[in-house]
Amino acid sequence: MKAAGAPVLRIVPLAILLGLLAFSFCSVGCSGNGRPDNGSVDPLVEALRERVETARIEGVIAYLSSEEAEGRPTGAPVMEEVRSFLAERMTEAGLSPAHVLGLEGLRQDFQIPARSSFIETPPGVETVEGANLVGIIPGETDDLLLITANYDGMGRDPDSGEIYPGADYNASGVAAALEIARFLASQAGRPRWTVVIALLDGEECGGFGSSALAELIEDRGLKDRCRAINLEGLGGGRGDYMNLWDQNYKKNRPTVEAILEAAEDLGIEV
């Protein structure tokens, strides 16, 4: 799958960013939807249109979906190179280790059953290593707003040997998460919630990365103080719509409404 064109890669992250800004940063002087109370357009909203860089997003997608990344199967040696690339982008974006989750660095290691992976393992090897990459933008409280996207892929076709590039599933989500991190970390004030950017491993082969992160959050006693937005397949379609799934969960409504209003401002069908 080729990387998608510029319009969708610019417009969808903008909508998500606007929603997150309304939800996480807006306080005094805002009506709750990210607009000033006097009804005028917030200058921050206009600035966003120029600050999200399509070329930077596409550069991340190009690397992750390249032959060099070998389809990004969890447990493969190449994944260390992929993680180094992504960790460098996270550091450049201004993310810091998630000490609130007990992590000293950007990495959360875990094991997955070898039989679930997309790689061949020697006889007797029962597990392979996976690693989530997790960074934060500290907020005023330890309430967590998670932005997640999986960076692993399906490796190679077992018959032809050709890689599964995974440009849209889910390199596009990873690239958008990094761009969101860069913008949010550049803001002068702290968000009301602590924003967690989590790039997940072991998802395509069974959701192991998200399970590992959820277990960590629960172990730290933060389960009831956490909301999550997962970015998946952002590069498909015409470039003027996105699908938003909220599972009809009441506590999601403030986040959902902020994103819906941001999408309306940008002319995106949801």
Image: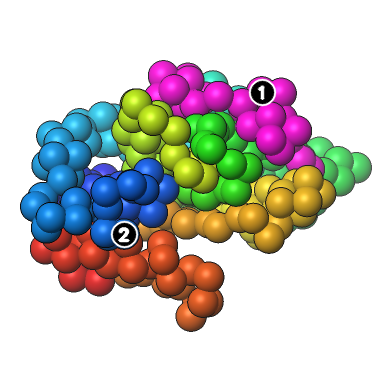
Residue 45 position, x and y percent, is 17, 45
Q: In the rendered structure, which amino acid carries the disc numbered 2?
A: Gly
Name the residue at 59% across, 41% down.
141
Q: Earlier in the sequence, mark 1 or mark 2?
A: 2
Q: Would residue 14 be seen by someone viewing this image from the given angle?
A: yes
Instruction: Locate residue 15 relative to residue 172 in the image: left or right.
Output: left
Q: Give the crowd class for mark 1: few <14, some 14-19, many >=20 residues within 10 Å.
A: some
Residue 12 image position (x, y, % from top left): 25, 53
Closer to us: 35 or 77:
35
Helix, strand or loop at label 2? It is: loop
**Quarter the C terminus occupies:** bottom left
Q: Amino acid at mark 1?
A: Gly
Residue appearing at x 86%, y 41% in the figure: 125
Q: Nearer the viewer, residue 198 or 6?
A: 198
Residue at (34%, 29%) from the top-left corner?
Answer: 187
- Crowding at dot 2, Cα within 10 Å, few <14 / some 14-19 / many 20+, comes out as some
Q: Which residue is mark 1?
A: 105
The magenta segment: 87-112
Q: In this rendering, does residue 215 appear at all?
A: no
In the rendered image, residue 74, in percent from the top left (x then y), is placed at 63, 42
Quarter residue 269 falls in:
bottom left
The residue carrying mark 2 is 32
Asked if the magenta segment contains residue 263, the reply would be no
Work out whether 45 lies above or below 62.
below
Distance from the alpha carbon under mark 1 to that under mark 2 = 34 Å
